[in-house]
Amino acid sequence: MGKGTQAAERKNHGAKPGPNYYLQTENSKRIFMTFLEALYGSQYHEIQQKGRDGNKGRLNANAFLTAFIILIVITVCMFCIRFVPGFNDKLSDEGSGFTGATNGKSIGKLLAIPLFVIIYLLISNTVGSATNFKKHVDSFMQLPDEVKQKANRKLLAPFFILLAVVLFLTLG
């Protein structure tokens, strides 16, 4: 246990410091950002630096989050197709009964557009609402510049990892 932790416990009469204590440096600046803070805050910050309305970043961030969630769904489906016996046959049988004898490209368009719209609407009314966007942006803007600069890496790393998993499952 470090000196800072012991001092905080003495100050709080022996109580352990709160959960955010470990996420702050000695000068009380946060050194950690959540995925949503990185997403919404970086979009706001980049658009605002170009001299435009930073609130347009909410649309971009919600679209990115929607694409990310769809990529998660695709990854789960590809994993099931690859490792669950009979899943691909069952999926193919259900798809042909639903759409008739069509190819994968038209089924993809038929499913992707409504899925994107539904997920986008859910996101824009929950985690991507205007009040949550403002909260995440405010938290992001309070971060030190060296932490803000890591926002794109925090966003793109999981996205590219999922993309690589999908490609591996598709090609492997």
Image: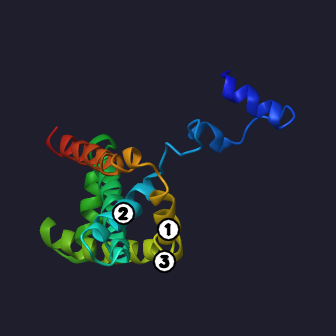
Q: Depth-wise, is mark 2 or mark 3 nearer the camera?
A: 3
C-alpha gap between disc 2 and disc 3: 15 Å
Amino acid type of the residue that numbered disc 2 sits on in the rendered structure: Leu
Nearer the N terminus, badge 1 or badge 2? 2
Residue at point 24% right, 61% down? Answer: 92
Is residue 168 found left or right of 18 in the rendered image? left
* Residue 97 relative to residue 132: left or right: left
Q: Position of residue 100 (x, y in %)?
A: 19, 76
Per the image, label 3 sits on a secondary structure element best described as helix
- Density class for disc 1 (Cα within 10 Å; few <14, some 14-19, many ≥20) is some
Q: What residue did someone put label 1 on?
A: 127
- Separation of residues labelled 1 and 3 (CA atoms): 9 Å
Task: Classify residue 23 by image quadrant.
Answer: top right
Q: Eyeballing the image, is 25 above or below 7?
A: below
Horizontal placement of 106 versus 141: left or right?
left
Image spot of residue 5 (x, y percent)? 70, 29
Asked whether residue 103 appears in the rendered view, the answer is no
Quadrant of image for the N terminus: top right
In the rendered image, is residue 33 in sight?
yes
